[in-house]
Amino acid sequence: MNQITESTVALGAPLLEVRGLCCERDERMLFAGLSFVVECGTVLQIAGSNGSGKTTLLRILCGLNDGYDGEIIWRGESTDDMAESFAGDLLYFGHRVGVNKILTPLENLRWSAGMQRNVNDQLLLDALEAVGLRGFEESPCYTLSAGQQQRVSLARLRLSPATLWVLDEPFTTLDVDAVAQLEQTLADHARQGGAVIVTTHHKLSMPSVSRLTLGVN
Amino acid sequence: MLSVGVKPSTRSAFMLTLKRDLLIAFKRKNDIVNPFMFFVIVISLFPLAISPEGERLTEIAAGVIWIAVLLSAMLSMDSLYRGDFEDGSLEILLLSPHPLFFLVLAKNIAHWLVSGLPVVIASPLLAYMLKLPSESYATLMLTLLIGTPTLSLIGSIAVALTVGLGSRGLILAVITLPFSVPVLIFGTLAVQASASGLPSGGYLTLLLALLAGSLSLAPLTSAAALRISVS
């Protein structure tokens, strides 16, 4: 069964609470009776073998997938009832990173970050510099490598006002330095009172990570 | 100067989406030019294949132009959500804290501005080629001005429904064309009426009603269809 190896300490109403989540896909039970809590200031790593339903779980949490049973509670209320405030406080980074290849990194961020908060070009340039894309801000994204495109999308982390970050395999194509930097960003976000849910096969070297392993029988 | 850190208004999210889609369209000129060229070529085939005689062309002009509009709209629709679906921008759109109705509407308007509007502007020239009486040019342009956004809005639903399918083939046309028939009928009737000196106001009113209906319902339906397609 699914298990949380290191549980978090509850403080008041948790940021996100999942109760009895079940999901079946193509007549295969991905997970059943899944319950866990995500508090502010914590990082939850979702582990599990390929095909164990990690991506599906994240998409369900964000509201992109509604083929499930169970309850998802956001700050004490169902996410269905407060969809708009939930969306304003959530940042999702998926397998498909949300970077248009025709546009430049700057143009991409102007839209993708600008949907969640008001931004100006200086902020965007600072964020691009922080992820190591200085000098590429005016190049069309199809000229960038896969890792660089991923960095464009990860620059949203530095701009987003969201409390909860839901990141699906954010480390895959990054180089060693960028991995260390991203881990630092996640740890900083948790320290500032945010929460992170992340799927990765990578061993996270930061304090206060809880692990949820899917598909362990 | 924008205030920083505040959640943007729905209006500014609408403008951001509209600007982004227009920018993408201007960077990918093929998407604009191909459907338009297709429109021009289809129309120019009729005088060659049927007859260059003025009388016979005048008779079919309205129908030919409208059918070409319908086909070229079909051709241009496919790119509406596909790119966003493939690169993941659609997920950002769906998870943004704004009513999806307005964001979908912004995308539809951007699409119409680059695919529908050029057709409306070029239509008198093609009508001249088909020997449509010059007094019905205004009616033709008016019907296209009302009809092409309606086609875009209807097509948007079908594209949203099929965007997740691997090979779409003709399914887009099968879904969209039946719903486009009323636009085609009232559009051609209005032009034919004005070509034979009859009032066309009634047909224009019906076209306007179709536009009003699809303007209020189609973005909602497209939004729901997009949610189904990504899940």
Image: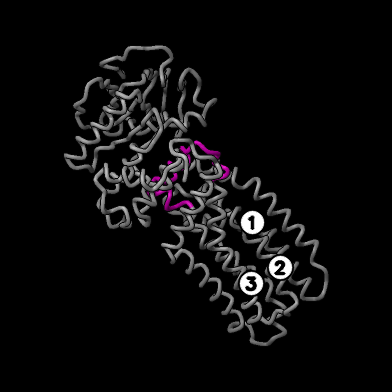
- Residue A56 placement, left or right of B206: left
Say which element carries label 2.
helix
User: Is B94 one of the magenta-colored residues?
Assistant: yes
Question: In which quarter of the view is residue A45 placed?
Answer: top left
Q: Earlier in the sequence, mark 2 or mark 1?
A: 1
Q: Mark 1 points at which residue?
A: B150
Q: Are the residues under badges 3 and 1 in a single subunit?
A: yes
Q: In this orientation, which residue lies closer to the viewer: A153 or B171?
A: A153
Q: Position of residue B22 (x, y in %)?
A: 48, 58
Prevailing secondary structure class for the magenta stretch in the rendered image: helix
Viewer-proximal residue among B219 and B41: B219
Q: Quadrant of residue B128?
A: bottom right
Q: Identify which amino acid the numbered label 3 is placed on.
A: Ile
- From the image, tell me which residue sits under label 3: B65
Most distant residue in the right direction: B198
CA separation in Å, label 3 and label 2: 9 Å
Task: Look at the image and give the residue range highlighted in magenta.
Answer: B81-103
